[in-house]
Image: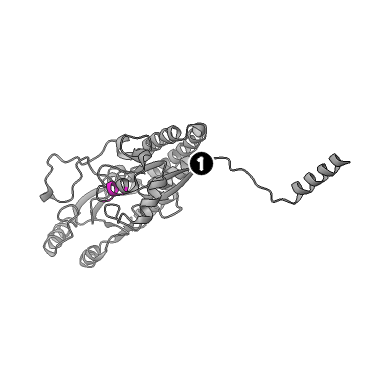
């Protein structure tokens, strides 16, 4: 009689208590410096990762504040994923030092710099601060080349598996899925963008060298007299004279940048302005973001 009563109580509790489902994965914390690496980490990590990005598509990744909220997030990180090549040199070292997180310090498994896994363009032959804000390792905006993204994806999946070996198969499976969709998208973009080859562009900042190389665009002028130095009226007049002699097809600038100089030049020349998002928006996949970039470029073609 006693055991029947116990069984009845257990059955009632099982039927009336809330139903809880154990998560499939014990999530690891990924701290991404830029939205493109946050998007890639989510694609490769899926349910096994919790990702935060230090910057948004509307921020200059060269310069952000090492806010207390970012320090706190860095302190909890199991994996740090950044561009490297000195892009974050103005703020990342401070975040690392303030966080005191041994897991994500240079040389540790939790420290991942994308630049370590690809070749960089525009490596300077002379390092001189008088030449402007140059990067000793080369141009760090390589995420605008889809072929380099594919190389980084493989390296990042391997690193995720090292940080979280229990889910290695999960990361490798997601990598295969990502690669399949990414390669299909690359073929689609190549086909759609054939008419862009040879187009002449003027840029605000030299952010687009990898995109130009991949699409076959020809950069004819930069509105900054030197990297990181705002355009002066003298330099803008010089650019105006140059493109009046040899017209450009479009003016490119990042959507987070001031459009004052490109608007001035566009009014003088009637050259269309293309404001491109340098990074994906929050929650936007790499494929959707890059597809928008191609669509915008083709809209003025």
Q: Which residues are magenta?
A: 91-95
Image quadrant for the N terminus?
top right
Q: Nearer the viewer, residue 75 or 234?
A: 75
Q: Nearer the viewer, residue 235 or 92?
A: 92
Q: Nearer the viewer, residue 49 or 39?
A: 49
Label 1 neighbour load within 10 Å: few <14, some 14-19, many 20+: many
Residue drawn at 58 percent across, 43 percent down: 23
Rendered location of residue 145, percent (x, y) = 33, 43
Q: Nearer the viewer, residue 165 or 150?
A: 165
Q: In terms of image quadrants, where is residue 189?
A: top left
Residue drawn at 27 percent across, 36 percent down: 119
Image quadrant for the C terminus?
bottom left
Helix, strand or loop at label 1? It is: helix
Residue drawn at 41 percent across, 55 percent down: 281
What secondary structure prevails in the magenta region? helix
* Residue tagged 1: 48
- Image height check: is 42 above or below 264? above
Whether residue 134 appears in this view of the structure is: yes
Rendered location of residue 134, percent (x, y) = 18, 47
Q: Is residue 190 left or right of residue 173?
A: left
Rendered location of residue 57, percent (x, y) = 36, 55
């Amino acid at each position: 009689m006693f055991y029947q009563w116990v069984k009845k109580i257990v059955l009632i509790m099982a039927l009336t208590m809330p139903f809880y489902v154990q998560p499939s994965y014990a999530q690891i914390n990924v701290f991404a410096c830029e939205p493109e690496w946050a998007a890639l980490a989510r694609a490769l990590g899926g349910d096994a990762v919790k990702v935060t990005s230090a910057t948004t598509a509307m921020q200059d990744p060269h310069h952000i504040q090492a806010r207390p909220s970012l320090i706190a997030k860095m302190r909890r990180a199991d994996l740090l994923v950044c561009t490297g090549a000195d892009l974050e040199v103005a703020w990342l070292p401070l975040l690392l030092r303030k966080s005191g997180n041994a897991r994500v310090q240079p040389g540790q498994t939790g420290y991942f710099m994308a630049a370590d896994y690809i070749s960089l363009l525009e490596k300077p032959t002379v390092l001189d601060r008088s030449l402007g804000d140059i990067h000793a390792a080369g141009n760090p905006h390589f995420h605008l080349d889809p072929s380099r993204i594919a190389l980084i994806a493989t390296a990042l999946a391997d690193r995720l598996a090292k940080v979280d070996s229990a889910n290695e198969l999960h990361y490798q499976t997601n990598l295969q899925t990502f690669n399949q969709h990414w390669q299909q998208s690359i073929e689609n973009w190549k086909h759609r963008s054939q008419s862009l080859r040879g187009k002449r562009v003027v840029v605000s900042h030299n952010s687009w060298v990898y995109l130009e190389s991949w699409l076959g665009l020809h950069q004819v002028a930069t509105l900054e007299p030197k990297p990181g130095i705002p355009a002066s009226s003298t330099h803008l007049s010089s650019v105006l004279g140059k493109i009046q002699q040899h017209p450009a097809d479009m003016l490119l600038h990042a959507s987070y940048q001031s459009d004052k100089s490109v608007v001035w030049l566009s009014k003088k020349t009637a050259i269309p302005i293309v404001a491109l998002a340098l990074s994906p928006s929050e929650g936007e996949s790499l494929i959707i973001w890059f597809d928008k970039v191609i669509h915008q470029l083709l809209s003025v073609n």
